[in-house]
Image (tube, rainbow, N blue to C red):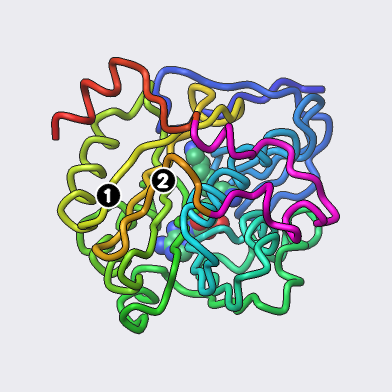
Amino acid sequence: GKKVYFNNPMWPGEAHSLAVEKVLYKGNSEFQESSTYGKVLVLDGIVQLTEKDECAYQEMIAHLPLCSIPSPKTVLVVGGGDGGVLREISRHSSVEQIDICEIDKMVIDVSKRFFPELAVGFEDPRVHLYIADAVDFLRCAPKGKYDAVIVDSSDPVGPAQELVGKPFFETVARALRPGGVLCNMAESMWLHTHLIQDMIYTCRQTFKGSVHYAWASVPTYPSGVIGFLICSTDGPPVDFINPINPIEKLEGALKHKRELRFYNSEMHSAAFALPSFLKREVTFL
Ligand code: AAT
């Protein structure tokens, strides 16, 4: 296949290349098939997911928060139009309502065409889809409605820029019940410590429960890792590190037609172990 370089502004001066076998679709958004990572979803030139490693990102961003609270019932997904995070949430039989607010309908349509393993998440009858900017959606969300909010959004350039600001986090905290949890995509510890610091600083002011950073290996994201900022609101304390709602005890999660590929309770706890440089840089705040 032809080698294609992806120049992600979150990774200046570096490029990740994939051998592209076939371009499956090209609109404002692009979808490609690579030889080693399966199909690839590229938005505005940036790799959003590949078939091979999406399990690591989607499983972690969904189960880190949902396994940290007892029987979650109402969940909001911000972004996530491919459906992969919905697929993971649907493993939790305690969940009664899954709202998703995605800004770009095309991501959903194309995912349904080319990524059935992810778009399957939309088939869950508990899912309610809203096509809107999450900034507006959360401004209008009822106070205390959600047990968990999962922000599966793009890098903070373009439409996702506001999703890392204090006003946005304040609306998330308001929409969560006391002791509710937020799990937010939080970039790479190798490349974006300043951004991570800013997000942690803002979230410590906004989320009066606790604020933690976790991470996982995702080879096709900048520098091969991705972080998660995980926070709780004031209320019943949440022990993020030792999951109170372990996936191994959830019948529906393991009976699910697709096996978990990455997440388990050991990976959950391990994700909160931070390298010394990051501890120094993020914990003094
Ligand atoms: N699970 C795939 C990973 C993604 S996709 C991010 C999604 O967030 C996109 O579908 C995009 O349309 C949506 N999005 C961006 N901004 C907003 C907004 N303001 N409101 C609602 N949805 C939005 C993320 C990959 C992370 C890449 C890490 N380098």
Where is 49 relative to 170, above or below? above
* Res 267 → quadrant: top right
From this view, report whether residue 5 is shown above or below residue 263: above
Q: What's under tag 2, amino acid-wise?
A: Phe
Marks 2 and 1 sit apart, C-alpha to C-alpha, by 9 Å
Q: Which residue is mark 2?
A: 240
The magenta region covers 245-269
Q: Position of residue 121 (x, y in %)?
A: 71, 63
State yes or no: residue 253 in magenta: yes
Is 53 one of the magenta-colored residues?
no
Residue at 51% across / 69% down in the picture? 75
Give the answer, above or below, for where 7 lies relative to 152: above
Question: Helix, strand, or loop for circle 2?
Answer: loop
Of callouts 2 and 1, the N-terminal one: 1
Please state which of residues 267 and 217 is positioned toward the viewer in this rendering. Answer: 267
Name the residue located 49 percent from the left edge and 22 percent from the top edge: 223
Within 8 Å of ligand 1, the CB of disc 2?
A: no
Q: Is residue 92 above or below residue 191?
A: below
Q: How many marks?
A: 2
Q: In x, y percent, where is residue 282? A: 23, 30
Dot 1 amino acid type: Ser
Quadrant for residue 88, please give it: bottom right
Residue at 61% from the left image edge and 25% from the top image edge:
219
Please give the name of the residue rendered at 74% of the width and 38% of the height, measured from the top-left corner.
261
Q: Residue at label 1?
A: 210
Which corner quadrant of the image does residue 56 belong to? Answer: top right
Mark 2 and mark 1 residues within 8 Å of each other at the beta carbon: yes
Q: Residues within 10 Å of mark 2 (few under 14, many from 20)?
A: many
Q: Position of residue 65 (x, y in %)?
A: 48, 53
